[in-house]
Amino acid sequence: MQIITPGMRLIPEAVLANNAALFRTIPETPSHADKSLHRVIIVGGGAGGLELATRLGCKFGNRRLSVTLVDRSRTHIWKPLLHEVASGALSASHDAVEYIAHASRHGYRYRIGEVVGIDRAKRQVFVAPSFDDDGRQIIPPRVLGYDTLVIAVGSISNDFGTPGAARYAISLDTAEQAARFNKRMIDACLRANAQYEQLSPGQLHCVIVGAGATGVELAAELHKSMREIASHNLDNIDFERLIRITIVEAGPRILPALPEHMAHASARLLIKLGVQIRCGIKVTEVTEDGIRLGEKLFVPAELVVWAAGIKAPDFLKTLDGLETDRINRLIVDETLRAVGDENVFAIGDCANCVLPGEDNALPPRAQTAHQQAGHMAKVVAARLAGQAVPAYRYRDYGSLVSLADYGAFGSLIGGLKIEGLLARLVYRSLHKMHLKAVHGLARTALASIGEMIVKRARPRIKLH
């Protein structure tokens, strides 16, 4: 993995290339748990990983099981909300879960760090050292032993090697990236309002590459938030006329993974809002001033978001011989066990799971990770009891897309179409279900009531 988060630095590439040599002399880190306990290590604290750690910790909590969650970040935020963090509709600090506090309340251990490799023969996980912003080591490299290993590292954006994409476009894989885009957007509005000269081509223009759910929902949120920012006494220029948002999609339509009626309804609404949609054309280069489409067309833009395609983190390709697909996902069977190792499992976006009778892998969606976390809890219980692990069964509960306050569309079980307020309520309920799995019903209910009260006192949009 090559993303560097605040407060942490990756160890050099030359060192990562020889993980075995680096960790051979490091003793296994004591777990401070009863050595008779079955050791479960969960790598990745996203939706699936955090829900699984919570379930196992609450059910077994140092009685028959030692559960450890390893993640390089110190907080968790539900990934489907990152587009709201980017637009300023949501502050990451208000919705974030602090792993250290959460672990102490729910019977599991949290270890900060980036997993860079495993030794399957010794059943060990290699965790890289962590550094502060000044380069001082916080935590040394560690070796953690396991009996059951669950990989739940999710996915990251896939720029397909497009020139300039990694340097000039911002992806929305982490809360830090979303917050960085939000600050860049606010700065763009302040700069345009304060300058005396005429706006240059591309100023106040935002291009979103990729028209999946993230890109489409972000476009609607930006339409709302950029105008909200402009309404706070930024009256030197006509923001309503000069703000421009463009979605670029290589496929024939937006929302390619969702039903056509949802794509058409969303497209009509976005066009009505003034969002420009360009389908059937690929981005060939991202520059400091915009994007290049095909061979000749150039679209100037001050802000570029890359939301096209996903892949699992690169380190999975060299995870001690485990089989992966072309986008680095671990190949798993119908029990979610990694092919070739009975002690390693994968869930969520980083798992390529093709169920019997199906042609395609399960979709990388929040409901998939949620269901797989529940299944993995049953798998661990079966392993503890010495029973055969159960096969996983996926149930598609439908699809939903929410376009800020402008509209929402959904397709539920049996093809039931919903839209408007009902669709928005169902969409919001998905996040509440995640919070319930992480915090429990009572805490989620109290937090929801508190949120409604506090929301009236806060600005409608984050302005710093």
Image (spheres, rainbow, N blue to C red):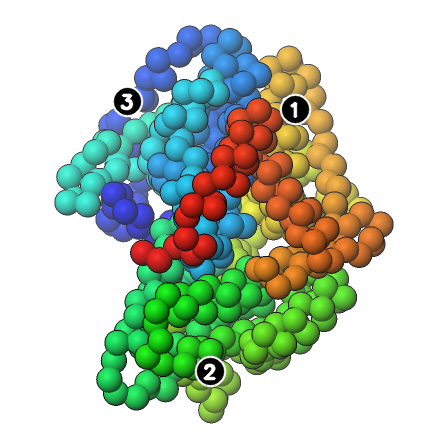
Secondary element under disc 3, as helix, strand or loop, is: loop
Q: Secondary structure at mark 1?
A: helix
Residue 332, numbered label:
none
Residue sticking out furthest to the bottom: 296
Q: CA distance from mark 1 to mark 3?
A: 32 Å
Which residue is denoted by mark 1 in the rendering? Answer: 378
Q: Classify residue 272 as left or right of residue 189.
A: right
Q: Nearer the viewer, mark 1 or mark 3?
A: 1
Q: Of the two numbered discs 1 and 2 on the same chain, state the one appearing first in sequence.
A: 2
The quadrant holding residue 237 is bottom left
| Observer-nearest of 437 and 284 | 437
Q: Are marks 2 and 3 in contact (CB under 8 Å)?
A: no
Which image quarter: residue 388? Answer: top right
Q: Which residue is mark 2?
A: 241
For the residues carrying marks 2 and 3, which lies nearer the camera in this image?
A: 2
Of the two numbered discs 1 and 2 in the rendering, the one whose residue sits closer to the viewer: 2
Question: What residue would you read off at disc 3?
Answer: 27
Mark with earlier residue (2, 3): 3
The local crowd at label 3, few if under 14, some if 14 to 19, many if 20 or more residues have their Cα within 10 Å, is few
* Residue 124 seen in the figure: no
Residue 20 vertical placement versus 31 (above, below): below
Does residue 188 lie above or below 457 as drawn? below
Q: Position of residue 196 (x, y in %)?
A: 24, 84
The residue located at (25%, 80%) in the rendering is 195
Neighbour class for label 1 at 10 Å: few (<14), some, many (≥20)? some
Examine the image and state in which quarter residue 60 appears: top right
In the rendered structure, are the residues bearing label 1 and label 3 in contact, judged by CB atoms less than 8 Å apart? no
